[in-house]
Structure formats: structure tokens, C-alpha cells
Amino acid sequence: MSAPLSPHPLPVQTNTPPEGKRPPEHLRRIIGSPPGPIVAFLTRGVWALLTAMSPNARDALARFVARLAYSLGIRRKVALDNLAHAMPEKSEAERHDIARGAYLTMARVVVESLPSGDRMTPDWDQQGIEGEEAFAALKAHVATGKGALLVTAHFGNWELVGQMLIRWGIPLNALVRPLKGALNTRIAENRLGAGAGLIYPKGAIQEITDAVNRGESAYMLLDQALPAKSAVFVPFFGRLASTTPAMAVAAERTGVPVFVVMGVRPPGPGARYKLEVEGPILPPKPGECADPITEHTARVTAALERAIRRHPEQWLWLHRRWKVQPPALTTAPSPGLTEGTPSK
């Protein structure tokens, strides 16, 4: 269970990773399709404008964009359908409120992740940590010289949470897909600027293994749908969801602990987040279940679901999380796949 929020402010942190802890050169490259010269020229002006804006102005822009997108109905049916399945106990009005919050979350991620320089408020590290024992365990593990596996979701602002972790002395590499376009290229550039490395799908498990042995943690999103042939299917809000097995495979290969890290935005403008940490989330013991990779993935996914249920407006209900259907079940699922019990 998470420890109570500390009433004491955290010490001031530096804005860069510790000396000598930047990822190696081969993880500091952008793979994908960059924008063409005209688009690149035009978007440079947009990035400069966002950089020049104050936190309050950025937040006002995000609110305007979110209201406009919701009013125009862009993916609104997807969001409301997801919520109807996931939270049938909520009233229709409550689900609309949550959906509006999800639009605002998405807009804030964009306007907060694209500026250059310091994108967080001066008091970014004074919001407290929930799950202090878990965070202490994470820091203690990193202090041994080995990295950990850090799992998050499209929640709050996952881009800035990664930057926060680096500032707290946890070197990390983000698992990413090859990128396309000006927006994704800019986000990748800012990840590198914050001190993170980039690990792409090809050879990812070996890259993760090498990274944790260098003392660098792997930072990954676990709420994206994969093609059925590449995925395991685990419960997520009452439905089986296509999920990457990479986290569980990497945990089995490296033997390092898994922690869920989520950034919860408090009320008000400005890019500040309270860190919520749960873990270590342990894999099943030998002989405990027939499919330890799927079971471990389910346990970590259950931790993500618990965090999202506490703050549903901060998750992106707009994306089609359940679009990939599982093949017909031929065996009964492991008990842990339906219980979703928290780790001890």
C-alpha cells in the first residue's frame, strides 16, 4: 500500500542528470520520419511561441483547445464508450466530466511537452510523494548501481514525470516507437535534452538489459494496444486488453524490480505533479501459475488501473485501448489475472 503524503518539502534538485550518467551515444538518436523543410520551418515558430508563454498562458491555451476539441466531438464517442464500459457505476454526467478532464489532460501534455528549456514550475519538486516507502526502495535499488523497470501510463504528463525522475537522480531510457512528423520529433528532442535515452522496439530487451547493468532504468508505457500476435491479454477495467509483454520479459531477464510511477496534477495551472509510486511489484513465484509473463503483466496493469481509478480525469480515455480483440481462450486464466490484488 502507498505511504501517506509527506508534509515536508523535498530538497531542491538540480535540472540535469548526474555527471557521467547520460545514456550512451547510440541511445541518443531519433529514428523515424522527420518533418519536411516547410513544416519544420513553420513549427519552429510554434515551439518558440510556446516557449515564450507563461505557465498560466499555456494552461489557458490548453483549456481552450480541450474545450474546442470536446465541443467538436473529436473522439468524444470513443471516450464516452470507454468510460461506459470501464465505469458503469458512474452517472452519464460524471462520465462526461471525466471525459472533459481527459481532453484537458491531452491538451496540457502537448503544450507542456513542446517548449524548450525548463518546462516545469520552480516548485515542481515540492508537491510531495505518495508511496514514500516505494520511492525509497527505488532510490535504494538505483544506489546499488543497477537500474529498475519503471512503468507508467498515458496519465497526467508522462513526459515530464520522466524528466522529474532524472532530476531526482534516476537515469533512465524511454521505450519508444519510431516517430513521425514534427510533433513527435520535437518530443523526442526534448526527451534527449532532459537526459533520457531512447530505446526502440528492435532489440529492446537486450538494450534494457544492457541499460540496467549500466545503472540506467527503463521507462515504459504499459497502456498501449499491440497486434494480437505480439501481445498478452490482461484485465484492464473489466476487459481483456492487448498489452506488451516486454516489461515482464525484461524483468525475468534482468531480475530487477518493477515500479509503477504516476504523476498526479494538483489543481491549478502550471506543470507540477505529485509523484505516486507503487512497488516493487513482484513476478509470480516459480510454479505459482502457468504463464508468469502474462501474470506479471496483469499485476502491473492492475496497479495502473488503481491509480487511474483514483484520478480518472487524468487518463486518456480518448484512445482505443481495447481495439485489439483477444483470440478465443483455450485455457482458464491464472487466478491473479482476475483478482488484481496489490503487491505487498
Image (tube, helix red, strand yellow):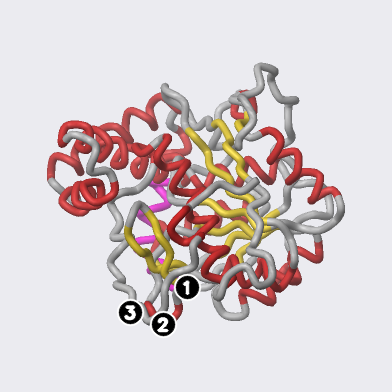
Residue name at image x 81 percent, y 45 percent: 140
Image position of 123 (left or right of 66): right
Dot 2: element: helix
Say which label, 3 or 2, has the lower sequence index: 2
The residue that mark 3 highlights is 327
Which residue range is magenta in the image? Answer: 32-47
The CA distance from mark 2 to mark 1 is 23 Å
Q: Nearer the viewer, mark 3 or mark 2?
A: 3
Relative to 26, say whether 218 is above or below: above
**226 or 156: nearer the eye?**
226
- N-term-proximal mark, 2 vs 1: 1
Q: Disc number at residue 32?
A: 1
**Residue at mark 2:** 229
Q: Amino acid at mark 1?
A: Gly
- Where 89 falls versus 27 (above or below)? above
Q: Which amino acid, mark 2? A: Lys
| Residue that appears at 40% across and 72% down | 226
